[in-house]
Image (spheres, helix red, strand yellow):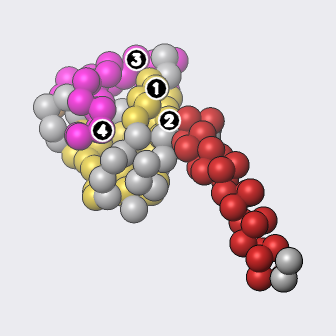
Amino acid sequence: MNMKHLIVSAALAISPALTNAAIAAPTAAKAVSINADFTSAGDINPKSFTVGVGQKVRFQVNPKESGTGCMSDIMVQGLWNRPQLLVKGKPVVMEFTPARPGTYRITCGMGVDRGFIRVN
Ligand SMILES: [Cu+2]
């Protein structure tokens, strides 16, 4: 058995394990967390985030005050389309896995801009 044959045999023996690991990884992977605070004066802070395609994202907004009027709720256009009320002391958690790259707008429920999530 020559050295080349040994290397090929080793690669064949390892490859099923690698394949299984690659398939299992996305479900086993923890979500990446991005966080913002909300105040009436400053709106959300920070206002821009960058995440990866196919990466599970946990976006948490911590309202330090309750939102009022137009800006009383929050959503992420194309990633989290159900507006969530901003109520003082009640964290809003939006979880999603972006399937396509792009810049996704964080808005109020009516679509007024308040930030964005860039997906690379
Ligand atoms: Cu609005």
How many angstroms separate mark 4 from mark 3 (CA)? 21 Å
For ligand 1, give the image quadrant.
top left
- What is the span of residues highlighted in magenta in the rendered image? 64-89
- Mark 2 belongs to which amino acid? Arg
Q: Which residue is mark 1?
A: 93
In the image, residue 82 above or below residue 103: above
Tell which tag, 4 or 3, sits nearer the viewer: 4
Q: Which residue is mark 4?
A: 79
Are the residues flagged by discs 2 and 3 in contact, CB closer than 8 Å? no
Question: Is residue 118 shown left or right of residue 16?
Answer: left
Q: Secondary structure at mark 4?
A: loop
Q: Residues within 10 Å of mark 2 (few under 14, many from 20)?
A: some
> How far across and how far down the image is residue 89, in percent?
51, 18
Tell which tag, 1 or 3, sits nearer the viewer: 1
> How far across and how far down the image is residue 58, in percent?
50, 35
Using the image as rendered, state which of residue 104 and residue 20 is in the foreground.
20
Tell which tag, 4 or 1, sits nearer the viewer: 4
Question: Is residue 34 shown left or right of residue 69?
Answer: right
Of pointers 1 and 3, the one earlier in the residue sequence: 3
Are the residues flagged by discs 1 and 2 in contact, CB closer than 8 Å? yes
Using the image as rendered, state which of residue 53 and residue 26 is in the foreground.
26
- Mark 4 belongs to which amino acid? Leu
- Mark 3 belongs to which amino acid? Val
Q: Residue at x 66, y 57 (%)?
A: 15
Q: What label does residue 87 carry, if any?
A: 3
> How far across and how far down the image is residue 104, in percent?
27, 50
Of pointers 2 and 4, the one earlier in the residue sequence: 2
Q: Residues within 10 Å of mark 3 (few under 14, many from 20)?
A: some
